[in-house]
Image: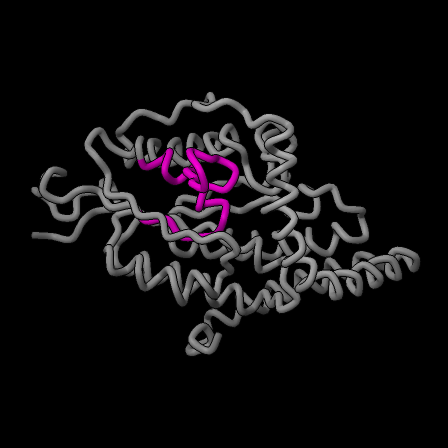
């Protein structure tokens, strides 16, 4: 028997789907966990689960390892080993926003970790799904001096994801732009996580990428929500409970450094030298990607 091919999900030629079901494993953070798309008390569904239902006409073995708050280190050290044990035919890796919201943000470390995750997944022959994402500062509507440093970080992560997706022949979704990012109907009350309609939009777009290559043979996810949109009072209650806790945790970690970054942003703006900050960030990304070609650099992260 020969190893499975790119143009299909059969683990071995001649093996039927009934004998070897398609295995889809999702890695990432709260976006992939499904926050914003509730299906019951304390339960989330999300785009990955919606996509799994449309991958094939037969049942799909779907495993969602994504955990809210995860960074690239968590995906590498905790989620990846569990994913490799499943030996997935399809694996999605959508992560990086939480890295930008930490005072420890280091684009070189982010690049090295993603490189190891992508390499491990494709090394087993899995089809890889990736995505770039909108920056959190813009989504939250923060003032420019606070939003720009976060946007610069997210652009850096997206650039790394673009480059590594090409290197590992991933199916990449450009989710950082488009009308969906400004359509409030797509987003939950916290303005950071897609609501059911937004999660369905992601699932539809991933399904289209796979279908174009003959890798998704099941029906595309329906674009319209299955459940009623949460009431304003329910959304406010979520923000006042879980949402407030989320903001408090991020602010404790990031806010002191973000204020320093904002002050730096204002100083450069006053001097007319804001372009230097962009050039500095671009240079850091170039150095991070260049370091991956040096043996042993990725293993050191």
Residue at position x 49%, y 61% from top?
72
The magenta stretch spans residue 40: yes
| Of the pair 62 and 94, the residue shown nearer to us | 62
Seen in the image, is 115 located left or right of residue 54? Answer: right
Q: Quadrant of residue 87?
A: bottom left
Residue at position x 61%, y 42% from top?
192
Residue 245 screen position, x and y as percent: 62, 52
Residue 139 screen position, x and y as percent: 67, 41
Image height of 3 relative to 55, above or below: below
The magenta stretch spans residue 214: no
Seen in the image, is 220 located left or right of residue 35? Answer: left
The answer to whether residue 80 of the structure is visible from this angle is yes
Residue at position x 50%, y 22% from top?
228
The answer to whether residue 183 of the structure is visible from this angle is no
Across the whole image, how many numbered discs are drawn on residues? 0
| Of the pair 44 and 78, the residue shown nearer to us | 44
Image height of 198 relative to 266, above or below: above
| Of the pair 160 and 28, the residue shown nearer to us | 28
Residue 17 screen position, x and y as percent: 14, 38
Residue at position x 52%, y 55% from top?
69
Question: Which residues lie in the magenta part?
Answer: 25-52
Seen in the image, is 97 located left or right of residue 80? Answer: right
Q: Quadrant of residue 123?
A: bottom left
Q: Quadrant of residue 282?
A: bottom right
């Amino acid at each position: 028997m020969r190893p499975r091919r790119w143009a299909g999900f059969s683990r071995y030629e001649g093996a039927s789907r009934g004998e070897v079901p398609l295995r889809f494993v999702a890695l990432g953070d709260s976006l992939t966990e499904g926050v914003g798309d509730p299906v019951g008390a304390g339960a989330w569904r999300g785009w990955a689960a919606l996509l799994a239902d449309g991958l094939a006409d037969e049942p799909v073995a779907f495993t969602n390892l994504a955990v809210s708050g995860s960074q690239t280190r968590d995906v590498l050290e905790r989620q990846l080993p569990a994913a490799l044990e499943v030996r997935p035919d399809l694996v999605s890796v959508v992560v990086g926003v939480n890295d930008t919201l930490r005072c420890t943000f280091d684009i070189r470390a982010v690049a090295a970790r993603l490189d190891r995750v992508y390499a491990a997944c494709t090394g087993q022959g899995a089809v890889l799904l990736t995505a770039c994402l909108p920056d959190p500062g813009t989504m939250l509507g923060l003032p420019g001096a606070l939003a720009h440093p976060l946007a610069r970080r997210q652009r850096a992560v997206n650039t790394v994801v673009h480059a590594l997706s090409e290197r590992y022949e991933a199916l990449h979704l450009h989710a950082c732009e488009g009308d969906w990012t400004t359509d409030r109907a797509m987003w939950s009350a916290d303005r950071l996580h897609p609501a059911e309609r937004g999660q369905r939009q992601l699932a539809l777009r991933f399904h289209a990428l796979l279908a174009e290559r003959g890798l998704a043979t099941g029906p595309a996810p329906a674009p319209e929500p299955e459940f009623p949109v949460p009431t304003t009072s329910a959304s406010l209650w979520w923000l006042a409970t879980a949402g407030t806790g989320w903001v408090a945790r991020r602010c404790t970690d990031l806010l002191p450094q973000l204020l320093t970054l904002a002050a730096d942003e204002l100083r450069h703006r006053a001097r007319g030298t804001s372009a230097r900050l962009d050039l500095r960030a671009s240079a850091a990304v170039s150095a991070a990607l260049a370091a991956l070609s040096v043996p042993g650099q990725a293993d050191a992260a």
